[in-house]
């Protein structure tokens, strides 16, 4: 768990086994050009809940179950050059291994990212389980999505019960 003002730096060439789960923090980031491998560790590789001034930059995440990256009820989020490869396990057919879920967040920028998974890739949601909130001012720019089996590449949707406004997908590509 990151605390206010902390950065997890995953250096290029490094492979770190584990997850990042941060709640109620500000000015927090996961950066570097290494790999965060959450396969077999926990359902979500990176979680930021009720945070502000969040940054994910350059890191590659490997995940195999559930939502790979979960950003909820947070504001001022910047995600750039982030790569996620979320594959299925032998026991799991890959459903629910979304790449990036933005749930109840405002002022979010996702730029130059790549996602591969067996379900939804770049998602907007306003309500799921006990998490909820208005979604406003979210931009996905220059992103590549590759979903395999089920789901969609770019999603505003299935779990909505709060207002969603000013969401932009620009210069994005869906491989499948």
Image (cartoon, rainbow, N blue to C red):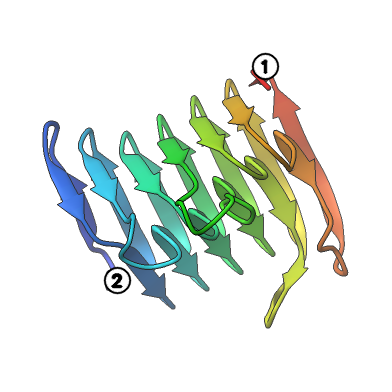
Is residue 90 or residue 10 the one in the foreground?
A: 90
Q: In which quarter of the image is residue 59?
A: top left
* Residue 48 point in image, percent of width and height: 46, 65
Decide which of tag 1 and tag 2 comes sooner along the chain: 2
Q: In this view, does 2 lie above or below 101?
A: below
- According to the picture, the residue beneath numbered tag 1 turns out to be 171
Q: Is residue 4 above or below residue 121?
A: below
* Residue 22 point in image, percent of width and height: 38, 71
Q: Residue 148 carries which label?
A: none
User: For the residues carrying marks 1 and 2, which lies nearer the camera in this image?
Assistant: 1
* Residue 106 point in image, percent of width and height: 66, 56
* Residue 164 point in image, percent of width and height: 84, 55
- Answer few, some or many: residues within 10 Å of disc 2's Cα (few below 14, many 20 plus, some between 14 and 19): some
Q: Is mark 2 on a helix, strand or loop?
A: loop
- Answer few, some or many: residues within 10 Å of disc 1's Cα (few below 14, many 20 plus, some between 14 and 19): few
Q: Is residue 133 above or below residue 125?
A: below
Q: In this view, does 174 lie to the left or right of 78?
A: right
Q: In which quarter of the image is residue 75?
A: bottom right
Count of labels in the image: 2
Q: Is residue 78 left or right of residue 97?
A: left
Residue at x 67%, y 16% (from the top left corner): 171
Residue at x 76%, y 64% (from the top left corner): 126
Residue at x 66%, y 61% (from the top left corner): 103
Q: Which mark is residue 4?
A: 2
Q: Quick one: quadrant of the N terminus?
A: bottom left
Is residue 109 or residue 88 the one in the foreground?
A: 88
Q: What element carries label 1?
A: loop
Q: Is residue 51 above or below residue 139?
A: below
Residue at x 53%, y 57% (from the top left corner): 92
């Amino acid at each position: 768990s990151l605390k206010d003002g902390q950065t997890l730096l995953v250096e290029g060439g490094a492979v770190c086994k584990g997850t990042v789960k941060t709640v109620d923090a500000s000015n927090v980031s996961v950066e570097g050009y290494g790999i965060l491998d959450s396969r077999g560790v926990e359902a979500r590789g990176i979680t930021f809940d009720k945070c502000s001034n969040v940054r994910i930059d350059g890191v590659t995440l490997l995940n195999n179950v559930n939502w790979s990256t979960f950003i909820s009820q947070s504001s001022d989020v910047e995600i750039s050059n982030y790569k996620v490869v979320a594959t299925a396990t032998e026991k799991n057919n890959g459903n629910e291994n979304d790449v990036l879920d933005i749930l109840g967040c405002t002022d979010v920028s996702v730029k130059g990212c790549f996602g591969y998974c067996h379900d939804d890739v770049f998602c907007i949601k306003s309500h799921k389980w006990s998490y909820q909130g208005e979604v406003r001012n979210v931009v996905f720019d220059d992103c590549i999505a590759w979903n395999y089996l089920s789901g969609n590449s770019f999603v505003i949707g299935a779990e909505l019960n709060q207002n969603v406004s000013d969401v932009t997908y620009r210069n994005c590509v869906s491989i499948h």
